Image: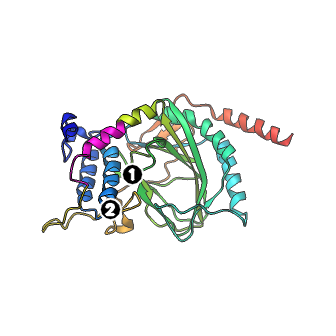
């Protein structure tokens, strides 16, 4: 407790402790902390859940205004991924992905692995992620192709804080008659956004700070994406401080040790539950209350070299390679393959 007070912390947190300190972000996270008071889990599970929420709401900095944006991926990269996808799903021996807490389905996703291609794309997309985030980044990994299948939902969650700081979802393709399956993501102004991606769209997001998922149940044949993850230079040293700051925001308190009992007049608190460390609000439609007042983004695909984010304004993405660069690289690689 001495360190808690020495750092000037308070609980509940004062408004100035939130990062960023926008009105919407503060309101969103105050609500979540209030919900956390009543989560019926073991003390160790409650501690982990509080650490995750404190990290996101209070401790780690945001790098961008809204925390997400959509751009267009290089066409030659998309073409390469689509070829890999369509060949892979046609293979009768295609492997399924291992069970993941936040993916709820009886039809586990297909997984089309190609580490060499993924690494090549991860490095090729580095300047895009640096241009959007405004910081120098270290590539960590590109994951996929993951191919979600019918009657799947992805619980709201946060990604790994160690490595998944600046990330992207490159949507490769989906079934031709599939219903739209939006990515749901909160932003730094407290909005819940439903973003519908078209093949070739790439969504940047601060994936270890912003809660995101696909809580609506997929109605379609398949939905495939490549996930790329980066972290800032010197992040390991920064993270050590961040983890300590997170612990000392709650470590000596009783708030996480035992759930409160609801008292009369508090029936309006939406229930929050955890599956692993993914989040659900089971009393709301699609297990997420923010969908009731979400901002819906459809048909927003910008041109190559442009981005669109939570303010709806199209902006240039500076210091990225010209589209022709990737076409030349692809042509050279194809020639080598033929030799």
Render colour scheme: rainbow
User: In the image, residue 137 lies at what x, y percent?
Assistant: 51, 32
Q: Which residue is mark 2?
A: 289
Which residue is rendered at x = 21% and y = 49% of the image?
253
Badge 2 density bin: few <14, some 14–19, many ≥20, Cα 10 Å: some
Most foreground residue, 187 or 265? 265
Q: Residue furthest left?
A: 264
Describe the element under mark 2 as helix, strand or loop: helix
Which residue is rendered at x = 34% and y = 68% of the image?
282
Residue 255 is inside the magenta segment: yes
Badge 1 density bin: few <14, some 14–19, many ≥20, Cα 10 Å: many
Which residue is rendered at x = 37% and y = 65% of the image?
287
Q: Looking at the image, how many numbered discs can be counted on the residues?
A: 2
Which residue is rendered at x = 72% and y = 35% of the image?
329
State which mark lies toward you, 2 or 1: 1
Left or right of 339 on screen, residue 114: left
Left or right of 245 on screen, residue 275: right
Residue 61 can be seen, yes or no: no
Quadrant containing the C terminus in the rendered view: top right
Q: Which residue is mark 1?
A: 211
Q: Quadrant of residue 2?
A: top left
Cα–Cα span, label 2 and label 1: 13 Å
Most foreground residue, 91 or 203? 91
Q: Which residues are magenta?
A: 242-256
Describe the element under mark 1 as helix, strand or loop: loop
Mark found first going from the N terminus, 2 or 1: 1
User: In the image, residue 227 lies at what x, y percent?
Assistant: 55, 48
Quadrant containing the N terminus in the rendered view: top left
């Amino acid at each position: 407790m001495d360190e808690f007070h020495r750092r000037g912390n308070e609980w509940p947190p004062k408004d100035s402790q939130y990062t960023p300190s926008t009105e919407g972000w503060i309101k969103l996270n105050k609500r979540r902390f209030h919900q956390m008071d009543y989560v019926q889990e073991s003390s160790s599970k409650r501690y982990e859940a509080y650490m995750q929420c404190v990290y996101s709401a209070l401790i780690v900095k945001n790098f961008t205004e809204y925390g997400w944006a959509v751009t267009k991926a290089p066409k030659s990269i998309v073409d390469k991924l689509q070829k890999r996808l369509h060949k892979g799903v046609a293979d009768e021996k295609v492997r399924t992905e291992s069970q993941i807490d936040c993916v709820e389905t009886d039809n586990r996703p297909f997984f089309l692995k190609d580490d060499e291609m993924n690494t090549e794309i991860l490095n090729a997309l580095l300047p895009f992620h640096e241009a959007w985030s405004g910081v120098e980044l270290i590539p960590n990994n590109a994951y996929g192709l993951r191919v979600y299948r019918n009657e799947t939902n992805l619980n709201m969650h946060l990604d790994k804080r160690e490595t998944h700081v600046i990330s992207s979802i490159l949507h490769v393709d989906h079934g031709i008659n599939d219903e739209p399956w939006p990515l749901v993501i909160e932003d730094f102004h407290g909005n819940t956004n439903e973003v519908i991606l078209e093949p070739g769209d790439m969504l940047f997001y601060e994936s270890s700070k912003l809660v995101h998922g696909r809580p609506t149940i997929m109605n379609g044949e398949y939905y495939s994406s490549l996930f790329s993850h980066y972290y800032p230079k010197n992040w390991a040293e920064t993270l050590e401080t961040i983890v300590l700051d997170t612990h000392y925001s709650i470590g000596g308190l009783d708030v996480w040790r035992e759930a409160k009992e609801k008292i009369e007049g508090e029936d309006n608190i939406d229930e929050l539950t955890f599956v692993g460390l993914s989040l659900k609000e089971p009393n709301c439609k699609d297990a997420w209350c923010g969908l009731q007042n979400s901002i819906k983004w459809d048909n927003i695909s910008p041109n190559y070299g442009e981005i669109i984010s939570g303010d709806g304004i199209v902006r240039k993405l500076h210091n990225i390679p010209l589209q022709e660069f990737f076409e030349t690289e692809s042509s050279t690689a194809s020639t080598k393959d033929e030799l």
